[in-house]
Amino acid sequence: MTDLRGPNLLVIGAARAGTTALCRSIARHPDVFLTKPKETHFLSFADQDVHFTGPGDQEMINDVAVTDVDAWRGLCAGAQSQTYRCDGSVSTLFYHQQSIPNIERYVDPGVRMVVSLREPVMRAFSSYLYLLARGHETAPSFAEALADESRRRDEGWHHLWQYRAMSHYGPQLEAFVTAFGRDSLFVFTHEELRHDRRDLLTRLCTWLDLDPAPTLGDLGEVNIGGVPKSSLLHNTMQRARASWLQPLLKRATSERFRERVRSSNLDRPELDPDLRARLVPEFAADVAVVEELLGRALPGWRE
């Protein structure tokens, strides 16, 4: 085992709750290093073979998951002088039964963990749109994708396909609070990130004992989901991502430019209000648990 220090700042979830935007913001800070890839999935799958079987799972997770501890710590080789070395794997929260023992085994005591939570129904819908935008989701509607969730889980599709399950934060968050204490977690909502990002980043940096100024520049929207307007453009971008062209394109263009091109080709459908009305009560008990853990009400999550 190497002497390198691995990540000591973990953005653990939830998926589709603004964690990519958050990680890109805090990575601007000179005292914060973000691993590449942002999502190593190490703490969820340490020492395991990762072989999820859903459409796109090979490229989305099987090929990128880092499962060897030396390789994981080696991602931070160039960041040993920085205060924080950040891993932004949102699988960590969901797979808490695996990730908590791995944090206790592989991460130094005093680790800081950041959690973003999104209103459960909209988080699930956003996950559906994300997979739709990448050409992996083939269900003709969100309702039909939800109805197929248990089959997909049983057949070994990875966590993003578990639309309902990933939105049940109560047991996930409670497990981390029990294991590490509430003071080890900085928990916020996606709504806070969207509506007052500067205030949120200022509070987060204060919690981390960092100057917030370097994190506050505008990023725009990132990683949005939706329905491709042009199949030709969408398929061209997908092929480029999976080919030898990807590293060349990354060097030749900015991340903001690539995101703007991708998002300009997406329509963003609205969630059917009737479906939302049927789904909200499913999460009521879970929302109550989260409110108790946070010590505050989340009224917009009950409507």
Image: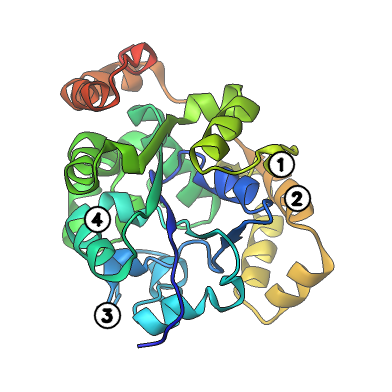
Residue kind at label 4, given as amino acid type: Tyr
**46 to the left or right of 65:** left
Q: Please give the label number shown on residue 104.
A: none
* Mark before the other along the chain sequence, 1 or 4: 4
Q: Is residue 5 left or right of residue 47?
A: right
Residue that label 4 marks? 95
Q: What SS does tag 4 mark?
A: loop
Q: Is residue 52 visible?
A: no
Q: Position of residue 46 (x, y in %)?
A: 28, 74
Is label 2 in contact with label 3 (beta carbons under 8 Å)? no
Which residue is disc 1 drawn over? 219
Looking at the rendered structure, the kind of residue marked 3 is Asp
Residue pictured at 54% horizontal, 42% vertical = 209
Q: Amino acid at mark 1?
A: Leu
Give the spatial CA distance, label 4 vs label 2. 31 Å
- Compare marks 1 and 2 and give the one earlier in the sequence: 1
Which mark is first along the chain, 3 or 2? 3
How far is the residue under mark 1 from the one under mark 4?
A: 29 Å
Element assignment for label 2: helix
Closer to the chain start, of discs 1 and 3, is: 3
Q: Nearer the viewer, mark 1 or mark 3?
A: 1
Mark number displayed over residue 256: 2
Q: In the image, is residue 115 above or below residue 101?
A: above
Residue receiving disc 3: 49
Does the image show residue 129? yes
SS at badge 3 = loop
Name the image quarter holding the N terminus. Answer: bottom left
Of badges 1 and 2, nearer the viewer stands 1
Horizontally, is 113 left or right of 81 in the view?
left
